[in-house]
C-alpha cells in the first residue's frame, strides 16, 4: 500500500493490553477527580461518615435489642455536652446525642443507598424503555412522569408517607415512589441524544442486536448525568428523609438525625441547643459532602474535558 | 479613531500601498499538554483594495490570524504572545466626496490623516501621514468603534453567527445604531445643533444609549413619537438598502423574518449585508462558503467580488479550498502550522509553487486530470503545535527534507518579486536568524 | 474512468457486469410532518421519492446532489438503516435474476406482485430468509461522514474494529487480535494502535479506523456517506487513494454519497444525480461530465471549481437562481423547473410558481388574501385591492416572468380583486434513455 504506517511512531515493544489501557484510563479519570480540592474535601467527609457508620458498634455500646433505638438514660435528662458518659449531652428523654449522631449515620446511609439504588434502577429502566422504544410507549410513560413531576417531590413524598403511616420504612418507600421520575426523564433525554450518534448506526450496520447496542453503545454513553445526579441525590435524600422525620412521619425514639433534630427543637428556646445542633450539623455535612463530590464528578466526566485530553 | 468625512483639507497624505500589515504575530493557547503555538510569527501585508487569500489546513492558524485583527479570541486560553497588526483606517476622499477622483485613484477613499501631524508626516506615522493603529494595542473602546465599522467579519456558519431570537432587521439595525447614529439623525431631519430634551432623547435612542424615560416619552408623547418614528424610518431604509445590495429579493419582508426562516445561502447574504453595512475598509471573510452548496457558493463568491470591486474594500479571504481562493484572490498566503510558508500573486502560487507544502496541497486536490487512485497525498498529519522546536514545521512530512530543515527555522524571503517562500530548498544559505531571537 | 487499462468502458461494463450487488426499485422514504398540540400528521417530506438504480459488483457509484436532496437518506435506505415507505431493495442478483426483476417492474402494477414474489423471497432485503439477511448485513457495510460520532468514544480500537468479527462469531481471543492487526495494517495503521481510544487519533486516522471496521467482514459493498468531506485536502487524498487500493484488491463496490463533484469525478465509474428526492440523471462519469443531459447536472458541474483549469477566467461561475423548494410540496412536473435556466412551457409550471414569484415582491405578497385552487395548475388568487390584482397580471405578462412560464399560462384573467389563472397540465417527467447506460429526466430530449 502506498501509505502505510502514517503515524511513524516506533512500534512499542512492551505488550499493551486492553485491561492495562482501561486501568490506566480509570487512573487518569481518578486523577482528574482528585485534582479538584473541593471534591477531595467532599470525599474525605464521605469517607469519615462511612467510617462512622461502619464502626458504630465499636464507637459506642450498641443498644439492645434494637441498636437503632436510642438508649435512654432516665437518670440523665437534658444534660449539656461534656457530661461524663454523654460527651455531646442528652435529649429531653435522656437519649445520648453522640449515640444518635453515630448510629444516625447508619440510618442515613441505609436511607440514601436504598432510595437511590432502587430509584436509579427503576428510573433507568423506564427512561430506557421510553427512549429506546419511542412512539406510543414513550408518550404514555412520559405523561405518567409528567403527572408525578407536577407535584413537588417533598409534598408528594409527605402525602404517601402520611397515608402509609408513620414509620422509617414507609419514608424509604415513599421516597422510592417519588424519586425515580427524575431519573427516568434524564435517562430518556440522554438515550435519545446518544442514539443520534453514528456509532449506534454503525453497530446496526454490523448487525449487532438491539440489546447489545443498548448495553455496549447507548447505556455507557448515556449514564454520566445520571451518575452525577444520583451522587447529588445521596445528599438530598437524607435532607428530605430528615424533613419527613422532623415532622413526625418516622417512629419516635429511632436513632435518626431528622428525628433527633425534631425532638431537640423544643429545647432550643430554653438554651438546650445541643440536642438539635449536632444531628443538624451531620445532615448539613452529609448533604454538603455529596454535593461537592457530585459537582466534582460532573466536571471530571464532562465529555468536553474528556475530548480535551 | 476618527471616521469623520471632513478634515482632509490641507492634508498631504502619501497614499501607502498597504492597508494592514501583520508582523511577527503570535497567538498561543494554554492547554493541559503545554503552550500551543497556534499562530507563531506570521508576517504579511494586505494591499489597498486587494483580496488576499489565506489558505491552509485545519489548525494552521488561519482563522486565529483573521480573528486577531478584531481581537476576537477566547481570552482565557488564548494569549496574544507578540507581534503587531498595523491597520490604516480610511476615510471618504475629500476631493470628490467618495465619488472617485484622480486624487484617490478613483476609489473614493483615502487614508485617514495621522492625528498627530494632520497628514504632514511625523515619527508617529513613520512619515506616511496616515493614521496607523496597532490593533493589538488599541483600547477596547476604540476596538469596538473599529469592529463592524472599519473592519468587518463574515463568519463561516451564518446559522451560528446570527442571533436566533432577533429578526434580521433588528440585528442589522444594531450595526447602524452603533456606528451611524449621526447619519440616521441627519436623515430624519434632526439637526446636530438642536438641543433640548427631544433632541437629546432622540440622540440617545439612535445611539443605543436610551434611558427608560426616553423610551417612555417616545411611546407616549406624540411629537417625540413622530420624530422617533422618522429615525426608525431612516434606519429601516438603510437596512433595506443594505439587504438589497446583496441581491436579497424583497428585503422589507426578510427584515421581519428570523434567521431560522431563511435558507443557508440567504443567511450568508444577510451576514454579508451586515459586514458591508458601514462600508468597511477591510473585510475578513472566514470560510464564508464552506457551509453552502456549490451552486449557492458560486453566487455568494460572485456577490462578494462584485461588492468589493464597487466599494474598493480590501478582503482577507480565509479558506481551505484552493480552487475557490484561486478564483477570487489577487494574492495568496499559504499557512502551515502557525506560519506563512509561501506568499505571492495568485498566478505565482498556483503556476509556480515553490514550497513543498504548497506543491503537495495543489497536487492533493482531485482534478479532471488526476488518474484515479493516484492522488499525491501528503503523508502524515498536521503536527501538534505544543512547544515546537526551532525547525521547519513541515520537515516531518516533507519528501525533500534535509539536515538544515530540522536544525533551524526557515524564514520568508523572496524568490521572485512579490513571491516569498520560507524553505531551505529555495534559500540554502538562510542564516539562523530565528534561532537568535 | 481515467485509468483506462483497469476499468472497462461503459459498454463492456454493462455486458460484463454480472448482475448487481444491490438493486433499488422505486424506493421512497416519506417523513411525516407533525404539527399542533396533538401532533397530527399534516404532510410528508418526500426525502426520497421513487428512486431506482443498481450497484454492480466492483464499481463505484457516485450519488451527488445539493444538501437536502435526499442523498444521505438514500444511503441509509440502501444500507438498511432506514426502512423504505415503499419500494424494494434487492440484494445479490445475478444477471438472470436482474433481468427477471427488470421484467417484473416493466409489468403493469397489478401483475407485478406475482412476478416479483419469487425474487422478493430470495433477494428482497425485508422479505428474504434470516440467513440471507445476515449475509446481507455482512456484505453491506457503511462508512460515515463524521468520524467523531461514528466511533464509540468509550471503546478501544480493538473493540471497534473487532466488533463485527465478534458479532458474527468469526474470531475471538488471540485470533481476533491478529485479524484486527491485519485490518489495521490494510488501512495504514498498525499494531501499536490497538489499545487506543478514538480521541487519540486525528480525523484522517479515525476515518481509517471506520474503514477497517467496514472491511472486517469482507463485504461486497460499502456505502460511503461523505467519507472525506470533514477532512483536509491532503488527508482526503490519502483516504481516497486508500479506498481505491482497497477496491482494486477486494473487488469492492462503493456507493459514494457526496456533494463534492471533484471527488466524485475522481472516484466514480457511474454517477447518479439527485434533486429533491428524485433521480434526475444517471450515467457513466465521463458521459455526465462531458455531455450531461439534465440542466441540473450541468449546473452542478459548472459550479464545481476546478484547479485543472489553467485560466481562472475560463471557468465562469455558473450559478443557480433561487433556493431549493420546500420538499414537503415539491414543484409539479420537473422538480427543477423553478430554478432551471432552460425551462420550457412543458416543465410543469403551476399555481405555486406564482406564489413563489409573489414572495419575492414586496407589497403584492402583503395584499394577497386568499388562494383557492381548482387543481395544482389552475386557481384563483384574491387580493385586498383591485390594483394589486391588476399589477400582478401585468407582471405575469411582462418580462419579469420567465418566458417559459408565460407561455405555459393557458389563461390569465383579472376579475375585480381576483386573478384567475390556468397553466397547461403536465405529467411527471420520466427518466428516459439518452445513450448507453445513460438516463435523464428532462423534457428536452436532444440536449
Image (cartoon, rainbow, N blue to C red):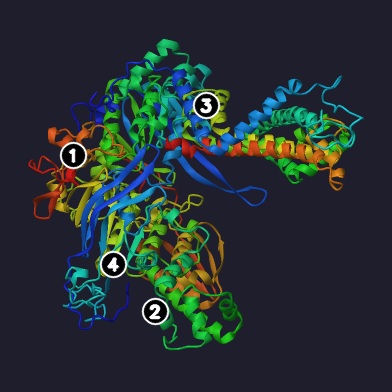
Residues under labels 4 and 3: Cα distance? 62 Å
Q: Secondary structure at mark 3?
A: loop
Q: Is residue B389 left or right of residue A66?
A: left
Query: In the rendered view of the protein, which quadrant contains the N terminus of chain C?
Result: top left
Residues under labels 4 and 2: Cα distance? 18 Å
Residues under labels 1 and 2: Cα distance? 55 Å
Q: Residue at 39% across / 34% down in the picture?
A: C53
Dot 1 and dot 2 within a common chain: yes
Residue B97 is drawn in which quadrant? bottom left
User: On what subunit does the disc labeled 4 rest?
Assistant: B
Residues under labels 3 and 2: Cα distance? 68 Å
Front label number (1 vs 2)? 2
Which residue matches tag 4? B281
Which residue matches tag 2? B183
Q: Given contact means CB atoms under 8 Å apart, are the residues at marks 1 and 2 in contact? A: no
Spot occupied by residue C222 in the image (x, y as percentages of width and height): 38, 28
User: On what subunit does the disc labeled 1 rest?
Assistant: B
Q: Residue furthest right?
A: A74
Specify which label sits upstream in the sequence, 4 or 2. 2
Residues under labels 3 and 1: Cα distance? 42 Å
Which residue matches tag 1? B369
Specify which label sits upstream in the sequence, 1 or 2. 2
User: On what subunit does the disc labeled 2 rest?
Assistant: B
Q: Nearer the viewer, residue B373 or B123?
A: B123
Q: Secondary structure at mark 2?
A: helix
Q: Residue at 24% across / 66% down in the picture?
A: B309
Say if A148 sits above or below B105 in the image. Answer: above
Q: Nearer the viewer, residue A32 or B95?
A: A32
Residue C159 is drawn in which quadrant? top left
Dot 4 and dot 2 within a common chain: yes
User: On what subunit does the disc labeled 3 rest?
Assistant: C
Which residue matches tag 3? C126
Amino acid at each position: 500500500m502506498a501509505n502505510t504506517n502514517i503515524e511513524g511512531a516506533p512500534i512499542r515493544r512492551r505488550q499493551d493490553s486492553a485491561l492495562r489501557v482501561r486501568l490506566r484510563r480509570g487512573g487518569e479519570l481518578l486523577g482528574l477527580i482528585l485534582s479538584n480540592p473541593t471534591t477531595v474535601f467532599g470525599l474525605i467527609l464521605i469517607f469519615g461518615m462511612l467510617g462512622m457508620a461502619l464502626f458504630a458498634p465499636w464507637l459506642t455500646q450498641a443498644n439492645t435489642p434494637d441498636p437503632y433505638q436510642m438508649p435512654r438514660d432516665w437518670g440523665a435528662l437534658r444534660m449539656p455536652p461534656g457530661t461524663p458518659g454523654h460527651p455531646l449531652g442528652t435529649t429531653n428523654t435522656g437519649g445520648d446525642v453522640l449515640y444518635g449522631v453515630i448510629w444516625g449515620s447508619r440510618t442515613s446511609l441505609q436511607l440514601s443507598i436504598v432510595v437511590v439504588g432502587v430509584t436509579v434502577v427503576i428510573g433507568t429502566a423506564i427512561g430506557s424503555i421510553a427512549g429506546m422504544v419511542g412512539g406510543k410507549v414513550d408518550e404514555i410513560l412520559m405523561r405518567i412522569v409528567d403527572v408525578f413531576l407536577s407535584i413537588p417531590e417533598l409534598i408528594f413524598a409527605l402525602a404517601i408517607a402520611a397515608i402509609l403511616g408513620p414509620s422509617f420504612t414507609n419514608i424509604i418507600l415513599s421516597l422510592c415512589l417519588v424519586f425515580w421520575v427524575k431519573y427516568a426523564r434524564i435517562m430518556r433525554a440522554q438515550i435519545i441524544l446518544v442514539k443520534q450518534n453514528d456509532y449506534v448506526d454503525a453497530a446496526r450496520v454490523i448487525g449487532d442486536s438491539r440489546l447489545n447496542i443498548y448495553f455496549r453503545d447507548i447505556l455507557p454513553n448515556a449514564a454520566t448525568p445520571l451518575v452525577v445526579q444520583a451522587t447529588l441525590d445521596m445528599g438530598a435524600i437524607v435532607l428530605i428523609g430528615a424533613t419527613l422525620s422532623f415532622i413526625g412521619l418516622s417512629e419516635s425514639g429511632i436513632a435518626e438525625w431528622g428525628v433527633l433534630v425534631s425532638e431537640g427543637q423544643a429545647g432550643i428556646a430554653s438554651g438546650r441547643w445541643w440536642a438539635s445542633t449536632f444531628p443538624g450539623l451531620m445532615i448539613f455535612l452529609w448533604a454538603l459532602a455529596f454535593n461537592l463530590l457530585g459537582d466534582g464528578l460532573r466536571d471530571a466526566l464532562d465529555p468536553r474535558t474528556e475530548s480535551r485530553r | 479613531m476618527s471616521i469623520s468625512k471632513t478634515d482632509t483639507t490641507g492634508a498631504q497624505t502619501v497614499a501607502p500601498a498597504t492597508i494592514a500589515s501583520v508582523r511577527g504575530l503570535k497567538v498561543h493557547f494554554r492547554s493541559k499538554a503545554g503552550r500551543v503555538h497556534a499562530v507563531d510569527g506570521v508576517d504579511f501585508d494586505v494591499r489597498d483594495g486587494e483580496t488576499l487569500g489565506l489558505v491552509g489546513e485545519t489548525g494552521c492558524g488561519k482563522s486565529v490570524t483573521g480573528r486577531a485583527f478584531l481581537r476576537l479570541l477566547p481570552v482565557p486560553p488564548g494569549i496574544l504572545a507578540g507581534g503587531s497588526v498595523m491597520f490604516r483606517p480610511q476615510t471618504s476622499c475629500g476631493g470628490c466626496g467618495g465619488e472617485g477622483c484622480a486624487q484617490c485613484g478613483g476609489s473614493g477613499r483615502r487614508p485617514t490623516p495621522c492625528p498627530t501631524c494632520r497628514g504632514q508626516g511625523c515619527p508617529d506615522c513613520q512619515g506616511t501621514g496616515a493614521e496607523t493603529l496597532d490593533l493589538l494595542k488599541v483600547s477596547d473602546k476604540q476596538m469596538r468603534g473599529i469592529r463592524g465599522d472599519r473592519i468587518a467579519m463574515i463568519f463561516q456558519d451564518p446559522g451560528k453567527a446570527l442571533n436566533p431570537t432577533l429578526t434580521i432587521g433588528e440585528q442589522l439595525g444594531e450595526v447602524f445604531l452603533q456606528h451611524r447614529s449621526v447619519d440616521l439623525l441627519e436623515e430624519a431631519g434632526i439637526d446636530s445643533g438642536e438641543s433640548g430634551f427631544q433632541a437629546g432623547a432622540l440622540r440617545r435612542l439612535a445611539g443605543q444609549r436610551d434611558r427608560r424615560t426616553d423610551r417612555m416619552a417616545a411611546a407616549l408623547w406624540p411629537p417625540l413619537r413622530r420624530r422617533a418614528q422618522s429615525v426608525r424610518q431612516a434606519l429601516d431604509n438603510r437596512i433595506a438598502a443594505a439587504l438589497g445590495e446583496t441581491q436579497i429579493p424583497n428585503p422589507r419582508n426578510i427584515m421581519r423574518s428570523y434567521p431560522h426562516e431563511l435558507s443557508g445561502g440567504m443567511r450568508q447574504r444577510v451576514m454579508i449585508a451586515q459586514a458591508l453595512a458601514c462600508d468597511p475598509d477591510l473585510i475578513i471573510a472566514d470560510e464564508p462558503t464552506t457551509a453552502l452548496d456549490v451552486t449557492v457558493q458560486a453566487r455568494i463568491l460572485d456577490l462578494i467580488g462584485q461588492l468589493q470591486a464597487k466599494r474598493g474594500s480590501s478582503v482577507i479571504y480565509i479558506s481551505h479550498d484552493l480552487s475557490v481562493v484561486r478564483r477570487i484572490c489577487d494574492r495568496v498566503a499559504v499557512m502551515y502550522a502557525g506560519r506563512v510558508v509561501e506568499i505571492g500573486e495568485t498566478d505565482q502560487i498556483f503556476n509556480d509553487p515553490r514550497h513543498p507544502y504548497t506543491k503537495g496541497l495543489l497536487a492533493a486536490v482531485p482534478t479532471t486530470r488526476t488518474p484515479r487512485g493516484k492522488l499525491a497525498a501528503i503523508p502524515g498529519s498536521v503536527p501538534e503545535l505544543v512547544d515546537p522546536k526551532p525547525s521547519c514545521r513541515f520537515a516531518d512530512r516533507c519528501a525533500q527534507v534535509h539536515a538544515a530543515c530540522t536544525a533551524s527555522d526557515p524564514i520568508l524571503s523572496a524568490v521572485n518579486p512579490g513571491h516569498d517562500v520560507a524553505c531551505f530548498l529555495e534559500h540554502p544559505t538562510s542564516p539562523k536568524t530565528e534561532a537568535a531571537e | 474512468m481515467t485509468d483506462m487499462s483497469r476499468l472497462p468502458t461503459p459498454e463492456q461494463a454493462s455486458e460484463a457486469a454480472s448482475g448487481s450487488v444491490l438493486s433499488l426499485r422505486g424506493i421512497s422514504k416519506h417523513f411525516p410532518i407533525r404539527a399542533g398540540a396533538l401532533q397530527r400528521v399534516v404532510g410528508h417530506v418526500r426525502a426520497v421519492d421513487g428512486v431506482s438504480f443498481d450497484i454492480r459488483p466492483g464499481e463505484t457509484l457516485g450519488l451527488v446532489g445539493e444538501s437536502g436532496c435526499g442523498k444521505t437518506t438514500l444511503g441509509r435506505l440502501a444500507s438498511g438503516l432506514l426502512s423504505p415507505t415503499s419500494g424494494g431493495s434487492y440484494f445479490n442478483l445475478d444477471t438472470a435474476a436482474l433481468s427477471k426483476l427488470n421484467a417484473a417492474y416493466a409489468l403493469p402494477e397489478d401483475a407485478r406482485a406475482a412476478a416479483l414474489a419469487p425474487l422478493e423471497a430470495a433477494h428482497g432485503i425485508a422479505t428474504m430468509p434470516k440467513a440471507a439477511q445476515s449475509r446481507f448485513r455482512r456484505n453491506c457495510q457503511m462508512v460515515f461522514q463524521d468520524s467523531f460520532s461514528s466511533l464509540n468514544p468509550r471503546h478501544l480500537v480493538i473493540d471497534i474494529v473487532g466488533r463485527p468479527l465478534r458479532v458474527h462469531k468469526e474470531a475471538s481471543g488471540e485470533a481476533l487480535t491478529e485479524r484486527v492487526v491485519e485490518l489495521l495494517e490494510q488501512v495504514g495503521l498498525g499494531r501499536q494502535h490497538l489499545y487506543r481510544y478514538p480521541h487519540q487519533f486525528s480525523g484522517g486516522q479515525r476515518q481509517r479506523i471506520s474503514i477497517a471496521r467496514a472491511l472486517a467482514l469482507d463485504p461486497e459493498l460499502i456505502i460511503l456517506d461523505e467519507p472525506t468531506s470533514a477532512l483536509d485536502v491532503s488527508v482526503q487524498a490519502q483516504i481516497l487513494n486508500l479506498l481505491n487500493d482497497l477496491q482494486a484488491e477486494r473487488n469492492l463496490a462503493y456507493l459514494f454519497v457526496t456533494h463534492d463533484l471533484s471527488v466524485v469525478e475522481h472516484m466514480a465509474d457511474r454517477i447518479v444525480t439527485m434533486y429533491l428526492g428524485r433521480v434526475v440523471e444517471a450515467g457513466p462519469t465521463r458521459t455526465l461530465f462531458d455531455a450531461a443531459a439534465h440542466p441540473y447536472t450541468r449546473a452542478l458541474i459548472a459550479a464545481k471549481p476546478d484547479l485543472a483549469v489553467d485560466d481562472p477566467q475560463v471557468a465562469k461561475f455558473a450559478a443557480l437562481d433561487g433556493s431549493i423548494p420546500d420538499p414537503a410540496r415539491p414543484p409539479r412536473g420537473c422538480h427543477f423547473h423553478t430554478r432551471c435556466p432552460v425551462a420550457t412551457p412543458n416543465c410543469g409550471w403551476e399555481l405555486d410558481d406564482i406564489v413563489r414569484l409573489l414572495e419575492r415582491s414586496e407589497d403584492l405578497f402583503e395584499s394577497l388574501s386568499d388562494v383557492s385552487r381548482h387543481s395544482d395548475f389552475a386557481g384563483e388568487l384574491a387580493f385586498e385591492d383591485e390594483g394589486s390584482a391588476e399589477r400582478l397580471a401585468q407582471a405575469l405578462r411582462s418580462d419579469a416572468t420567465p418566458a417559459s412560464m408565460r407561455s405555459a399560462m393557458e389563461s390569465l384573467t383579472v376579475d375585480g380583486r381576483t386573478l384567475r389563472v390556468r397553466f397547461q397540465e403536465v405529467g411527471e417527467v420520466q427518466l428516459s434513455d439518452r445513450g448507453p447506460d445513460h438516463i435523464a429526466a428532462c423534457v428536452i430530449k436532444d440536449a
